[in-house]
Amino acid sequence: MANKIAVLPGDGIGPEVMDEALKVLHRTEEKFGFKLEIEKGLIGGAAIDAKGHPLPAETKELVLGVDAVLLGSIGGPKWDNLAPELTPELGGLLALRKLLNLYINLRPAVVYEELKESSPLSPKVLSGKVDLLTVRELAHGIYFGQPKGLTDEEAFDTMIYRKEEVEQIAHVAFQQAQRRRGKVTSVDKANVLSSSKLWRKVVIEVHKEYPDVSLEHMYVDNAAMQLMLNPLQFDVILTTNLFGDILSDESAAICGSLGMLPSASLGAKISLYEPAGGSAPDIAGQGKANPIAQILSLAMMLETSFGQADGASAIRKAVDKAIADGYRTGDIAKAGEEVLSTSRMGDVICSLI
């Protein structure tokens, strides 16, 4: 019986780049002899327009019955003025994360040698290959802690972490490091925050189970600075929901284009894979979007949820080869370089698998 995925194309450029990811999926299936059953659903603005809600009942039922979710970007100005619980972001994406009990976000950031000119950092800083992974706690911390309140005179949020929550994500970070270059940088604010003191203590304890991985601790303000000064020093960054939200976006900026960056949000049973960038409604429907982030999110899904490591590797190598051979969409092209359409870039990557 085929493994089943829910495909939620989303809004803006979402459907365009999703088409290319599915094109790559079909090519990979042919090459490596596996098959995934695909069922599409609505989320975000597209779901609001069709069903009156950013996460309709049909989509909830769909995603709870699959092995993984491949999500496109969602949202846009058209839906910004709705009640918060009906916006694509809060009523759609955050509600979906809660529904699936997603607890860890993995966001890789790679600066390709051929695309270093697109990075805002100087060539001196980018003297080697930047290849880091942020492992962000996704289900707890200050975004979800209670009590929480807002009046005209005061506002408050609560940051809570429990030992088992820190243990869970720490194990994932160390295991990821074992598959990479063997280094974890745990980012906290243990000089000020009680929750960070517990975080650091628990990470140190978990580290004892991974003697082949090195561990360093860094305060979040210093980590933000070090990402700009020397991003090559990082392999795996392990951190909280709030700090991870900020640092993963900062690491993405180093790469020069969000169109290159995938992400995965892991759950106990069902995981979700999506590009790091937004729905870019200003270029939607024009064939200008870069599909690589969506395609690399597909690769993360194949490897993590379905054990198709060879297929995932083939996709990543095809993307690397496309970039090395000079194929460019508009977001990563230099003046004078040929600019490929969204569909053409997908075709090129398929041809290289």
Image: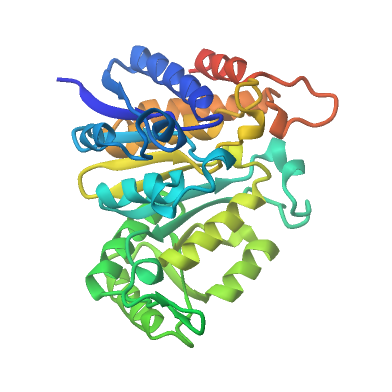
Q: Residue 180, percent across and down?
A: 44, 50
Q: Residue furthest left?
A: 1
Placement of 19 over or under 290, stated as above or below: above
Placement of 44 over or under 208, stated as above or below: above
Placement of 150 over or under 194, stated as above or below: above
16 sits to left or right of 274: right
Placement of 38 over or under 109, stated as above or below: above
Q: Residue 17, percent across and down?
A: 52, 26
Q: Quadrant of residue 229?
A: bottom right
In this rendered view, identify the residue nearer to me: 4 or 190: 4
* Quadrant position of the N terminus in the picture: top left
Q: Residue furthest right?
A: 336
Q: What residue is drawn where x is 25% and y is 31%?
A: 58
Q: Residue 112, percent across and down?
A: 64, 40
In this rendered view, identify the residue nearer to me: 166 or 233: 166
Number of marks: 0
Q: What residue is drawn where x is 49% and y is 83%?
A: 154
In this rendered view, identify the residue nearer to me: 295 or 237: 295
Q: What residue is drawn where x is 43% and y is 38%?
A: 44
Q: Residue 150, percent across and down?
A: 44, 76
Q: Quadrant of residue 56?
A: top left
* Colour theme: rainbow
